[in-house]
Amino acid sequence: MGVKIRKKNGKWYVFVNYNGKRKAKCVGVSRELAETVRRTLEAKLALGDIGFLEQAESKPTLNEYSDRWFREHAEIQCKPSTVYSYRQLLRLYVKPRFGDMPLDTIKRDDVKAFITEYSSAGKLSRNTVRLMLSALRVILNHAIEDGIIDHNPAERLGRLTKTQKAKREATALTKAEAEKFLDAVRAICPEQYPLFLTALRAGLRRGELVALKWGDIQFGENEQDSNRFILVQRNYVHGKFTTPKSKKNRRVDLSRQLRQALIELRDVQLFEAFLQGRNSIADDLVFQSGAETIVDPDNLVSRSFLPALEKAGLRKIRFHDLRHTFGSLLIQDGASLTYVKEQMGHSSIQITVDTYGHLIPGADIAWVDRLDSKTTQQPNATQAQPEEEAYKEDVANELISWRALRDSNSRPTDSKSVALST
């Protein structure tokens, strides 16, 4: 109980706790000023002057404060995609419930009821509910730092984000379906074939695809040279160039088929640059619109991707599912989870396991059938039977396969492992 000062994020705050009445105020970046205010308030309390605690200070509403937060913080420090996500979540879910409420009137029970309503109804996925809560929580945390409120009613409510709506699993094309899709692309939009091949053979997100530059590609001396890769270091989201989703660059191996397709495209663009008097295209975009500008990702989906799916007679999937197809085919061809994580650019291997773990070869009813064969009595214990010899051979083959799947070498060299890149 009394008056204390505390520094948070470069600013000094004065906190008063007197007979159950609390007040917090940001006084700026000067410690000397904070000490002066503290001594002044302590003197008032000693004389019984508590009028400053009785003053009703109007607090901003969530609408008012969130606009200030976007202007002074989010638009300066956050990626455009993050800002867009926060705006959408607040506009669609949070502001209709809390927008007109002063920040200090938002109670924990109100937030719990709000989250439970969306979770129990099964209207939204758990991830959407979690992000919705996160958007509210981050704004209220900043309100604490600004001395507007002294606690966050949206903290530690993650357990309430469980929802009845089924989790959406990654959708992927089979190898045959992927080839049908590429055939359709060649038929209706051949100029986009290298782009869609890159999506299927390198697993780049659509923003990473359209932001790719020739200087990001290492072709190697020839197709036998293993030093061939794409350096993913750029993304294009909501009209702005930014970093990849994980904020880290990654190297994606360049398959032989993709290398050849990109070399053909490079030669065409290099020739056009020579005609313009330029001898380098390192800073040029790999995939360009007809006007030689960046490809609009939304137009790419509506004008090329969806028509190609229809032409191929395939079900409607998301453009992002081409990335899932890349990961799925790697797994099914025997690539290790560590290798897939590196190629996909996942922040942790747990994400890779959660997304693609069910595709790991080996989930086979034959495993439980072998339990039966192990307990079956052989007619002659001194002489190996044909079934036993066959069983031993099967087990040996399974062991070899098991070891291959978990090989720590992230670059398989056998012909089956590189089937995807040929």
Image (cartoon, grey):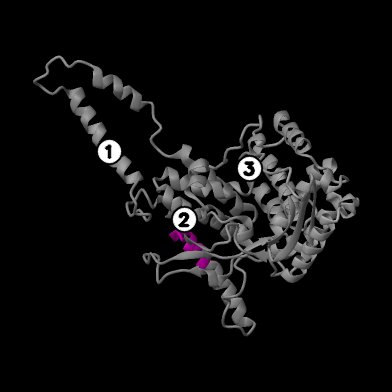
**Residue behind mark 3:** 317
- Residue identifier under label 2: 342
As for residue 304 lying within the magenta part, the answer is no
Task: State which quadrant residue 331 falls in.
Answer: top left
User: With 120 as the anchor, is 209 left or right in this view?
Assistant: left
Residue 8, compared with residue 125, is above or below; it is below
Residue 207 lies, with reference to residue 273, above or below; the image says above
Whichever of callouts 3 and 1 sits on the residue coming sooner in the sequence is 3
Q: Label 2, secondary structure: give it.
A: helix
Query: Can residue 296 be spotted in the picture?
Result: no
**Badge 3 amino acid:** Ile
Q: What residue type is labelled 1?
A: Leu
How much space separates mark 3 and mark 2, taking CA atoms?
Answer: 25 Å
Magenta stretch: give its range. Answer: 253-263
Q: Name the amino acid type tagged 2.
A: Glu
**Which residue shows up at 41% across the image and 32% down it?**
363
Crowding around mark 2 (Cα neighbors within 10 Å: few <14, some 14 to 19, many 20+) is some
Measuring from the top left, give residue 321's x and y in whole percent.
Answer: 59, 46
